[in-house]
Image (tube, rainbow, N blue to C red):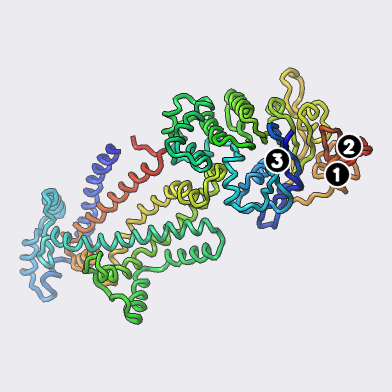
Amino acid sequence: MEELLKVDNLVTQFRTPKGKLSALREVSFSVDKGETLCIVGESGSGKSITSLSIMGLLPSNGEVSDGSIQFKNTELVGKSERELERLRGNEMSMIFQDPMTALNPVFTIGYQLCEPLMIHKKLSKKEAIHESIELLTKVGIPNPSEKLKNYPHELSGGMRQRVMIAMAFACEPSLLIADEPTTALDVTIQAQILDLIYDLKEQIGMGVIFVTHDMGVVAEIADKVMVMYAGEVVEVGDVETLFNDPQHPYTKGLLAAVPNVDDKDQSLNTIEGSAPSLDEPINGCPFHPRCPFVMESCKVEKPPLFKVSDYQESKCWLQEESANDKSTVTS
Amino acid sequence: MIGLIIRRLFQLLFLLLGISFLVFMSMHLAPGDPAQIIAGPTASSSDLEAIREDLGLNKPVMVQYVDYLGSILQGDFGYSYQTNQSVSEAILTRFPTTVKLATASMILAIIIGIVAGMISAMRQNSWIDVSSTTISLAGVSIPNFWLGTMLILLFSVNLQWLPVGGLTEPWYTVEGIKELILPAITLGTASAALITRMARSSMLEVIQSDYVRTARAKGVKRHSITWVHALRNAMIPVITIIGINFGSLLGGTIITEQVFAINGIGRLMIDAIAARDFPVVQATVLLVAGIFVVVNLIVDIIYAIIDPRISYE
């Protein structure tokens, strides 16, 4: 399939009073046209920073300091703000976690929805309003022409997220980044929103990066899964392989931590300890202090990403042997 | 909205009633006898008695107050003890001057404050930000009588660019504007500094908000994010400050008018207090209190216009 996005050895750093801290360390992955990549991991693992780095929306103290982000074969790292403005909302767009705060409280839904249409598609106000009504209908909002005159506070959380989705889809982007779009919503609304994103994705045929920590959601929508830990990719694989045969101890831990409703006696599995903070110096594998399979080599040297099969890569010394006869992906 | 205006104007009546009582009592209980001041230090006691009789000052205080209320309800604010001029007339001739000064200062403060605050926030920690923060700290701290004197010394006495004082020419003439510059800066500096600080911190908060990030994610251009998406949200707390600050600005006119020899309400009030000119003091204080309340009512109305979440129904 055609490659849409290729991220290579991405390093994102933040300037802090303690000096420059790396939030992403040599993150590499790719997304094909029409493919859904789920990024999973604990809070602080770098999922959101990965999305914001791609969009060029890092907070003012953050910057991509190394690596490359190729979108449709053009390099995004080093592009000017003006060039990125032309892509954002047009070629690639983003849906955020909290619909309650993601819309501007002092402008109407109509104003906010017309904006990308007028900027990128150069529609007149009248055409943009017409198009907005269609978009709202598409995302399942009743009385769309009335709703355009509403302010965000007059809509429920689920409705606001639908508006956000309509905004993100307005210019039919090739890449959609959804950063935990259902986390802040009721469970019943969650399913509707997931279905909606899935349907629209199918219609437009775009690539999706879906950030979540909900393994249930991953199983439902992902083609490919990328597991992140402490700013690094620890395992990548297609969804079936990864769920059936996780290689990295962290992925195994994450999957084991999903509660099973059928087994009432099962005690809830957790991964002992907590993820290292950004300013903690890490020797060897960042997961080794929490890893049940820790070996001496883990404490000394960081493992490279080993190719386990054509569909799976894992950054763990345990895979060294199985990967021995195959070439390693990165070193 | 109309309900709010009616309700607030109704409250204003009670507020003015309370203020009139406080001012009336404090003037009458304060030491100093207007009859003595009018007649001079050599007057005989029968002269003083005659003056008191004439002004109604020998009646019990409560009776005097009720009489006073009765006449102001008929629009009669009495006559100045010093000049015998009607108080309403004295106020009407001086009021436009004070309005001119206060408006010019406020406009200056709002423009400088918002622009400086926005630029500071957009370039946080740059030299522009550091200097604007430092200047605004100085601006809040400098007393305006000192600032006024220094400005006169520099621009009027040494450089001779601007007049030393007075505010008599119409504002739309070159002379009128030249007269207005120094007093407006003197009176507006503290407000400008306060608005700068508020606008800066409010803007910093807003540009880090989720909805600004959403606007960027849509591809909205940087300048329209700043001046459209962020500005309107950032203005909400700034407007509160402007409303509250208007009170101290009115207070500041007293000193500024004194420094620049401007015949406005502030100077009228100071002279009247010194001379125990009760009717003039009472009327000017009521006027200033009324203006403050009306300005804050306007602030509340502006609120509802810029923030759709605020409703007074």
Chain containing the residue with disc 2: A
Q: Residue at x 60, y 28 (%)?
A: A200
x and y, in percent, of residue B275 in the image: 18, 68
Q: Secondary structure at mark 1?
A: loop
- State the separation of the CA atoms marked 3 and 1: 25 Å
Q: Residue at x 54, y 59 (%)?
A: B123
> Residue under circle 3?
A5
> Residue under circle 2?
A319
Tell me, yes or no, whether the two marked residues, 1 and 2, touch with CB atoms within 8 Å.
yes
Chain containing the residue with disc 3: A
Q: Which mark is drawn over residue A54?
A: none
Check disc 3: other Cα within 10 Å, few if <14, some if 14-19, many if 20+. many
Chain containing the residue with disc 1: A
Question: Which callout, 3 or 2, points at the residue further toward the start of the chain?
Answer: 3
Task: Name which residue type carries label 3.
Answer: Leu
Judge if badges 3 and 1 mark residues of a common chain. yes
x and y, in percent, of residue A306 in the image: 86, 39
- Image quarter where the N terminus of chain B lies is top left
The answer to which image quadrant residue B198 occupies is: bottom left
Residue A316 visible in rendering? yes
Check disc 2: other Cα within 10 Å, few if <14, some if 14-19, many if 20+. some
Q: Which mark is drawn over residue A303?
A: 1
